[in-house]
Image: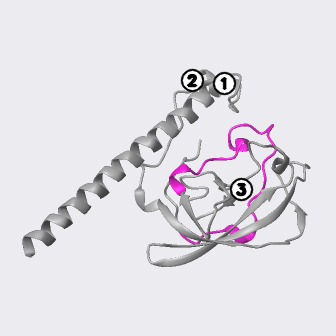
Amino acid sequence: MKFVVFSLFLVIFDLCIAQEKEYLAELQQHRKAIDLKFADEEESPLEENDLRDFKNLDYFEADPKFRLKAKFVRTPNTPLFAMPTTTLRLPLYRKYAEIYFSLNGKKYKLDCYQNQELISDPEYHDYLFLPFTDLTNGETTYSGGRYLDLRIPEGDSIILDFNKTYNPYCAYNGEYSCPVVPNENHLEIPVAAGVKKF
């Protein structure tokens, strides 16, 4: 009996290792695609001087603990609001859902938003915007916070992958207009994952 249990444990352990390797390989490809975009003068948000010397963005080491399953609670019929940006632009958003998750044994909540202009675009009709700040801002990450892109899930759960958090374009170039992170989306923890400050 003990041998059967131990064998089962080994199978599960090997499966977990394989899944982690697969995830890390996928994340590496994701980051490589971002770096290629930043190196492309047609697509890059970088200023000319920075683009000339660009090789890749600086990332935190991938950490599977920052990829987690969260509870997705829709908030229907919330009012539209003009989200402040780093310029005078005021795009229309509405709060779409509240996301509840645990990290390092503590519980947290973040709000995610739906851009009212993007919902008419077939490619982005299910796109959700999750801006947040945390205790790394101004130290190892951009002072204005970072963003995470999500897609509307079918059920009441969603995968949050902080390893894929990125800087707003205004972190690289002052000509861009970027949404300012709402106060309610501040995390009182350091999220040492994703893109570091430039």
Chief SS of the magenta region = loop
Residue at the (40%, 41%) spot, across then down: 25
CB within 8 Å, label 1 to label 3: no
User: At numbered mark 3, what does the secondary structure look like: helix, strand or loop?
Assistant: strand
Residue at the (66%, 24%) spot, across then down: 49
Of the image marks 3 and 2, the number of the one nearer the N terminus: 2
Residue 38 highlighted magenta (yes or no): no
Reading the image, the residue beneath label 2 is 53
Figure check: 18 above or below 153: above
Picture coordinates of residue 80 (x, y %)?
89, 65
Disc 1 residue type (three-letter): Asn
Residue 179 highlighted magenta (yes or no): yes
Q: Bounds of the magenta span? A: 162-189
Picture coordinates of residue 194 (x, y %)?
52, 50
Q: Looking at the rendering, in which quadrant would you find the N terminus? A: bottom left
CB within 8 Å, label 2 to label 1: yes
Find the distance from the CA under tag 3 to the CA under tag 2: 31 Å
Reading the image, the residue beneath label 3 is 129
User: At numbered mark 1, what does the secondary structure look like: helix, strand or loop?
Assistant: helix
Q: Residues within 10 Å of mark 2 (few under 14, many from 20)?
A: few
Q: Residues within 10 Å of mark 3 (few under 14, many from 20)?
A: some
Q: Nearer the viewer, residue 159 or 53?
A: 159
CB within 8 Å, label 3 to label 2: no
Q: Looking at the rendering, in which quadrant would you find the C terminus? A: top right
Residue at the (68%, 31%) spot, across then down: 46
Picture coordinates of residue 124 (x, y %)?
75, 46
Disc 2 residue type (three-letter): Asp
Q: Nearer the viewer, residue 106 or 113?
A: 113
Q: How many marks?
A: 3
Disc 3 residue type (three-letter): Phe
Residue at the (61%, 48%) spot, across then down: 166
Reading the image, the residue beneath label 1 is 49
